[in-house]
Amino acid sequence: MSASFAHFDWIAPVYDALVFVVFGRRLNRAQAVFLDRIPPGASVLIVGGGTGWLLEPLLTDGRAARIVYLESSARMLARASCRMLNRQLMGTVEFRLGDERSLRSDERFDLLMTPFVLDLFTTETLQTLFIPRLRSALKENGLWLITDFIRTSVWWQRALLWSMIRFFILTARIEARHLADWQRLLSEAGLTLRERSPQVGGFVSTEVWSV
Ligand SMILES: C[S@@+](CC[C@H](N)C(=O)[O-])C[C@H]1O[C@@H](n2cnc3c(N)ncnc32)[C@H](O)[C@@H]1O
């Protein structure tokens, strides 16, 4: 089994517009909440960054000494690198097509980011593949910044989540059939929650975890 089940190539050209129609800029703002926790000079791994808007604040801020941008969709990756070229912000970004298995076994980062990525996978994939592989790519005392949907009891959030999962099953063949309890899985994998900021009326959580 592979954690790179999803195929966002088809939806890449319209992804940002769709997100904007449903959420405005709120999902972007949620991802930026803890960017100031990036230690100066840090090596940063972004997994599943999509079309790359997150690179702009990161590069402008200049804290990260090295950024690896790991994306499994070639079209998402192309859009991210074009965006940086257009803004003359290439800096120290290494654009890498692939998934967590593309990381070299000796690669270690100070900080990694998974913005709206954990929600793509089943509990089993997160537990046996995705979380262990990424955890092993973190240095001792490394930080993992996560922004993602969480399970709530609010009816409209549950309905929207259900619809989004169905939509991405059809358009991107994501593996998840419902939202895994990723907070529990991170905790079971030995990670510790350091900070948490509820976003979008509690529908999204931005969190800092450490090894
Ligand atoms: C739901 S989109 C989120 C995009 C972006 N983070 C955002 O919030 O706009 C998920 C992204 O993760 C990428 N992806 C999915 N599985 C991946 C994996 N195993 N490794 C790297 N990227 C992956 C997809 O290609 C897609 O661009």
Image (cartoon, grey):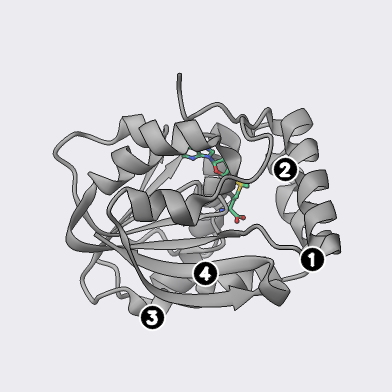
- Mark 4 or 2, closer to the camera: 4
Q: Which residue is mark 1?
A: 154
Q: Are marks 3 and 4 in contact (CB under 8 Å)?
A: no
The disc, 3 or 4, on the residue closer to the chain's N-terminal end is: 3
- Amino acid type, residue under disc 2 in the picture: Pro
What's the residue at 78%, 69% (across, down)?
24
Q: Between disc 1 and disc 3, whose residue precedes?
A: 3
Residue hosting label 2: 13
CA distance separating discs 1 and 2 = 31 Å
Q: Label 1 is placed on what type of residue?
A: Val
User: Disc 4 and disc 2: Cα gap in Å?
Assistant: 26 Å
Point out the image quarter for the C terminus.
bottom left
Tell me if the residue at label 4 has its CB under 8 Å from ligand 1: no
The answer to whether residue 50 is visible is yes
Query: Any atom of ligand 1 within 8 Å of the CB at mark 2?
Result: no
Label placed on residue 206: 4
Mark-to-mark CA distance, 1 and 4: 18 Å
For ligand 1, give the image quadrant.
top right
Kindly give the residue lying farthest to the top in the view shown: 1
Asked where in the image residue 133 lies, by quadrant, the reply is top left
* Circle 1 or circle 4, nearest the eye: 1
> What SS does tag 1 mark?
loop
Task: Point out the tag, 4 or 2, that comes first from the N-terminus.
Answer: 2
The 10 Å Cα crowd at callout 4, few under 14, some 14 to 19, many 20 or more, is many
Q: Position of residue 36 (x, y in %)?
A: 38, 80
Q: Which element type, helix, strand or loop, lies under badge 4?
A: strand
* Amino acid type of the residue tagged 4 in the rendering: Thr
- Quarter of the image with the N terminus in it: top left
Residue 113 on image: x %, y %:
41, 57
Q: Would you say 38 lies left or right of 16 here?
A: left
